[in-house]
Each structure stands twice: as structure tokens, then as C-alpha cells.
Image: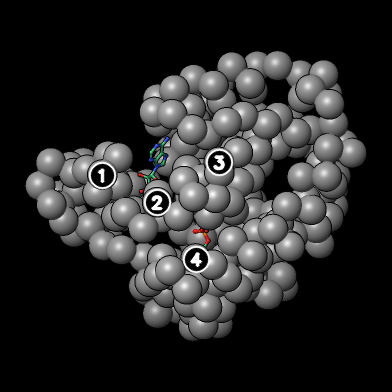
Amino acid sequence: MRIVLVGPPGAGKGTQAAYLAENLSIPHISTGDLFRANISQGTALGKQAKAYIHAGNLVPDEVTIAMAQDRMAQPDAVNGFLLDGFPRNVSQAQALDQALTADDVRLDAVLDLEVPEEEVVKRIAGRRICRNNSAHVFHITYSPSKQEGVCDACGGELYQRGDDSEETVRTRLEVYHTQTEPIIDYYKAQGLVVTISALGKVTEVTERAMEALKRDPASQG
Ligand code: AP5
Ligand code: MG
């Protein structure tokens, strides 16, 4: 399957992607995680992206699209992928469509995670991530690690993302509404959007998502 996950910052895209990708046996491709890996490795790409991410703005399309396409061209993504955080504006969505058409494949669904704004602010404020593996995501209240600051899965150090400050989160939410939300209408016109509530326990949201992905998006308006 080829799936795009869309939703505001803090909606739980990364959290759900880890479970969905495993259930569906497809790789989880997060452009945010790819940028953060490049930043921590000090690559030229990381240096280019750093200031944009720190400010909560989108990294320019030419950098982002090339990076995403490069990742999608890896052998593990030949039969499908779960995109998290890409595309993030209409021009990225158009570039993705062009690349898929060139490969004679298409998206199966765009899973839209709906969460009220006050909830995303709480989720982001308490988020902690493992330095060893960005798929290991915790929350100081909703899903705390057994030992404070230590990852349950691998013992890695938990940290708070630099762009999770209150001010940057406000910018990220605004960027989401102005630049990313329009892709939902873009994909609705293609009959691909499946919307679910991302409220409730992580496992409940995963079940809801798996059920929704079994339905034909075109029948959901
Ligand atoms: P990115 O890393 O994609 O960040 P984001 O979209 O802001 O989303 P987040 O990762 O903050 O949230 P999430 O939905 O993954 O939530 P999570 O699962 O962690 O992008 C970062 C930056 O990179 C961008 O601002 C931009 O600068 C750049 N960038 C990336 N892609 C780009 C692109 N395509 N073009 C241009 N620039 C790009 O969950 C959040 C918290 O909630 C966690 O603590 C979790 O434990 C908790 N939680 C999750 N689910 C639940 C639940 N059901 N109940 C209670 N708590 C929950
Ligand atoms: Mg994420």
C-alpha cells in the first residue's frame, strides 16, 4: 500500500506510523525524522534545513522533494510506503503525483488525523523522543517511560525536540493551516481521503486507522 498520513503537528502521525507500518509491512518514511537525522549527523542537507525547522517553517521544496524521492526510491519502498509529513503543501503533492505516475503506481489512501488544537498543544508540550530511534516516542503524562529520561525500548536518552517550544509550535500550527491543510482538498478531489479522530488511546487510534484503511476512500466523500 502507498499511504500518506496527514494531520497537525502533535496529532500522533509518528506514533501511529510506527504501528501502521509494522501492521502493513511497509516502511515508515518521515521527512521530519530524515531532516533530524541529517542535522544530528551534521550533513550539508542538515545544515540547510536546520534554521527552517528551528523556526517552525517548511524547508524549501527543492531540498525536501529531492530527499523524499531519494528515500522512496530505496528498495524497501518498492511495494509501498507510509509517508509521514510529506507532502506538506500542494506543490509537494503535485511532485509526488508526477513521480508516482512516472513509476505507473498511485496512492491508495490519504489518512487524515483529526485532533482539536488544545490537545495537540498538550501532546507536543509533553513529548519526549529517544536519541537512538525516533520511532520510540513517549509523553510525560500520556505514555511515560518507566524511568524518567530513559527509553523503555532501548535504554537511549529521551530528549525534547528543539522545535517543540511554545512559540515555534504556534508557527508550525499556522503553517499547517495555511500550507498543509490545502492538500486535503487536493486529495479529496482524487477520492483518496479517509478522515479519523485521533483522540483516545494510541491502540484505539491504530485500530480505527486500520479499519478505515480497509474501506474504499472514494466512498467517504
Ligand atoms: P515533523 O517532524 O513532521 O513534525 P510535525 O508535523 O510538526 O509533527 P510532529 O512530529 O510534531 O507530530 P506527530 O503528529 O508526529 O506526533 P507524535 O506521534 O510525535 O516536521 C518537523 C519540521 O521538519 C517541520 O516543521 C518542517 O520544518 C520540516 N519538515 C518536515 N517535513 C517537511 C516537508 N515535507 N516540507 C518542508 N518541511 C518539512 O505525537 C506527539 C505526542 O503525543 C507524543 O508525545 C506522543 O506520545 C503523544 N501521543 C500520540 N498519540 C497519542 C494519543 N492517542 N493519546 C495521547 N498522547 C498521544
Ligand atoms: Mg512526527
Q: CA distance from mark 1 to mark 2?
A: 10 Å
Tell me whether circle 1 and circle 2 mark residues in contact (CB < 8 Å). Answer: yes
User: Where is residue 82 shown, x and y percent of the image?
Assistant: 58, 40
Q: Which mark is residue 122?
A: 2
Helix, strand or loop under label 1: loop
Q: CA distance from mark 4 to mark 2?
A: 11 Å
Of mark 4 and mark 2, the one earlier in the sequence is 2
In this view, 16 is above or below 49 = above
The amino acid on which the numbered mark 2 sits, given as a three-letter code, is Lys
Of mark 1 and mark 3, the one earlier in the sequence is 3
Q: Which mark is residue 115?
A: 3
User: Where is residue 189 shown, x and y percent of the image?
Assistant: 89, 39
In this view, 174 is above or below 98 = below
Of mark 2 and mark 3, the one earlier in the sequence is 3
The amino acid on which the numbered mark 3 sits, given as a three-letter code, is Val
Of mark 4 and mark 3, the one earlier in the sequence is 3
Q: CA distance from mark 1 to mark 3?
A: 18 Å
Residue wearing tag 1: 141
The amino acid on which the numbered mark 1 sits, given as a three-letter code, is Thr
